Amino acid sequence: MKRLSCLLLLCTLSISSTAHAAEIRTVALSGQQIPGLPDGTIFTSFQGFALVLNDAGQTAFRAYDSDSNFIPGVWSEGAGSLNLVAAVGQQAPGLPDGVTYVELQNPNRQVINDAGSTAFSGRFSGGGSGGIGFWSSGPGGSALIVRSGEQAAGTPAGVTYGSFGGFDHADSL
């Protein structure tokens, strides 16, 4: 009995001795040029505690840029480097031309999974259409997952998605 306990203890110590902590690094700073945007477009502020981190050490966060009067956006490292995923005024993927994000909801609710996909919610308007949607963005770009007003999956005809319980549930995607 004592030998078995000793053997298990040694295996545990051996496994834990190979684990290491991720290196601390800077992802973005206020005043820093935003990658992929025109020169002089800098991060000006970050929204509260709107940073999320996956097990791979990748981040997604909400921030404001200096171009266009502090239009809010969602940035993510999920595609391998820091990229703008969505910004107010941009075309909303999966919706007709001219339908744009008018608000990116609940800054503490974007999520990033271990594969690097970032999910977020937003309000959209334009082209005779408006509502709320949830998007997922990964290395291939962003895709609409679900939007208010469309047929609810697995329900009788005519049952549509409504307000999504206060429009703050991107964390359940």
Image (cartoon, rainbow, N blue to C red):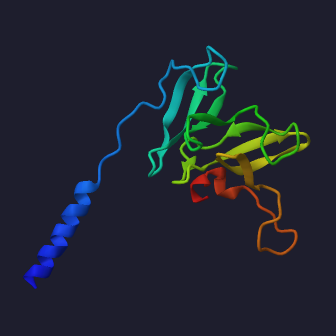
From this view, report whether residue 66 is shown above or below residue 170: above
From this view, report whether residue 20 is shown above or below residue 99: below
Residue 56 located left or right of residue 84: left
Q: Is residue 40 visible?
A: yes
Name of the residue lying farthest toward the right: 128
Where residue 48 sits in the image (x, y, percent)?
Answer: 48, 35
Tell me where residue 83 sits by quadrant: top right
Q: Residue at x 35, y 44 (%)?
A: 22
Q: Residue at x 49, y 22 (%)?
A: 30
Tell me where residue 57 sits by quadrant: top left
If the image is split into quadrants, where does the N terminus sit? bottom left
Q: Residue at x 64, y 45 (%)?
A: 139
User: Relative to the observer, which residue lies in front, 9 or 136?
Assistant: 9
Residue 14 located left or right of residue 112: left
Where residue 54 sits in the image (x, y, percent)?
Answer: 47, 50
Where residue 172 sits in the image (x, y, percent)?
Answer: 58, 59
If the image is split into quadrants, where does the C terminus sit? bottom right
Residue 8 located left or right of residue 157: left
From this view, report whether residue 25 is shown above or below residue 96: above
Count up the numbered dots.
0
Name of the residue lying farthest toward the left: 2
Where residue 133 sits in the image (x, y, percent)?
Answer: 73, 50
From this view, report whether residue 81 is shown above or below residue 121: above
User: Relative to the observer, which residue lies in front, 105 or 98?
Assistant: 98
